[in-house]
Structures are given as C-alpha cells and as structure tokens.
Amino acid sequence: MLKIIATGPESSGKTTVCKALSEHFNIPFSKEYAREFLTNLEREYNQNDLIKIAEGQFKSEYRIQESEGGNHKPQTTNHKLSLHDTDLITIKIWSNYKYGNCDKWIIEQIEKQKSEKRIYLLCKPDIPWEADPQRENPNDREELFEIHKQELENLGHTYFVVEGESRVEKSISEILNLI
C-alpha cells in the first residue's frame, strides 16, 4: 500500500489537499487527530497531551488503511492508496519546537515507519494564514516548513513540495507518476 501523507506547518493547505485527493481518487483519508482531541479538551494542552494525540493519529492512520480493503479503489489505477492529513512526524516536530524534546514512543514509531512506502506532500505556507483557535504560529510557518523538509530528508522519505494555486493538481500529478 502506498501511503500519501500531507504534511507541513499550520495553515499550509494540508486538509484542503487531502479533501481534494480523497475526492479525486475516491478514497477516504485519516484526519488530523489533534483537531478532534483539542476540540474536546476543556483546558490548555500540554506536552503530556502530545503522546495521546500521537497515539490517536497512529491509530487513525492504520484504521483508515484497514478500511480501504473493499469499496475504496482509486478511480485511475488498481494500486491501493492510503491518504493521511499529517502523521507522527508533525507531532515530533511540534514537540521539539515547542518543548525542546519528544516522547520516545513517537520517535520509535517514526523509525518503524521508515520501512513503509510513504510519500509526503510537503505543503508550503505560501497561502494566506487562516486564524483558527487551534493554530499558534502565524509568523513561524517558513521556519517550520524548513524543519519539516529537513526531517523528511533525514528520515530518507520521498517528498514533493506542493505550492501555489496549483497545489492540488501538482499533488495528483505526482501521485499518478508514482502508481
């Protein structure tokens, strides 16, 4: 199974790209678990919450993969795709950026995932910032983009930068070239 993961800093179009790819390839996608978790949290989150978010994101990723066995085949190919709005790498980056360290479990899972066929769509923050109660960094998006890029390179994952007005079309084209 080819896993396609939209990643990047806040407000860079990850969810928009995922929704469009989901419609184009007729497959579901795992949503960013942090949104659900933080929406239901009745206090400010802290570093201890990041492991709960990571566990939820991890379960969500593998649950969507299992559900794609039957009726969800891509319209353009017989290959199976799995689509995800972020993954553990984003949680690792955020934990290191905000708190200066990351839980060992998150790092271990990321290392295990290196053996999977994962392709990243690294969303560039070249679109206007959209305020949202869960977003914290309108001014650090370029720095976080570079951190994401470096992390993907360090892990040896294939990635494509998606940017500009044609980010969805470029994403579709890159995926079709791979399958």
Image: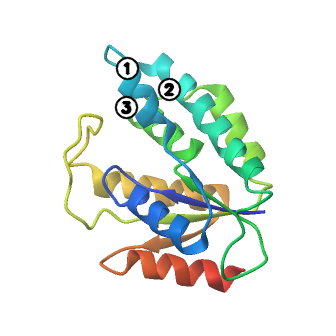
Quadrant for the C terminus, please: bottom right
Give the label on residue 50, or none. 2
Label 2, residues with CA under 10 Å away: few <14, some 14-19, many ≥20: many
Question: In the rendered image of this protein, does residue 4 appear above or below residue 30?
Answer: below
Q: CA distance from mark 3 to mark 1?
A: 12 Å
Q: Nearer the viewer, residue 50 or 142?
A: 50
Residue where numbered disc 3 is placed: 98
Left or right? Give the position of 105 relative to 66.
left
Quadrant for the N terminus, please: bottom right
Q: CA distance from mark 2 to mark 3?
A: 11 Å
- In the rendered image, which quarter is residue 35 located in? top left
Instruction: Inspect this view and state whether residue 29 appears.
Output: yes
Left or right? Give the position of 92 relative to 99.
right
* Of the image marks 2 and 3, the number of the one nearer the N terminus: 2
Instruction: Identify the residue at horizontal 36%, vertical 27% (top origin).
Output: 39
Give the label on residue 45, or none. 1
Q: Residue furthest top?
A: 43
Q: Tell me which amino acid carries mark 2.
A: Leu
Mark 2 vs 1: CB contact within 8 A: yes
- In the rendered image, which quarter is residue 13 located in? bottom left
Instruction: Identify the residue at horizontal 45%, vertical 27% (top origin).
Output: 37
Residue 66: percent from left, percent from top:
77, 48
Residue 6: percent from left, percent from top:
51, 59
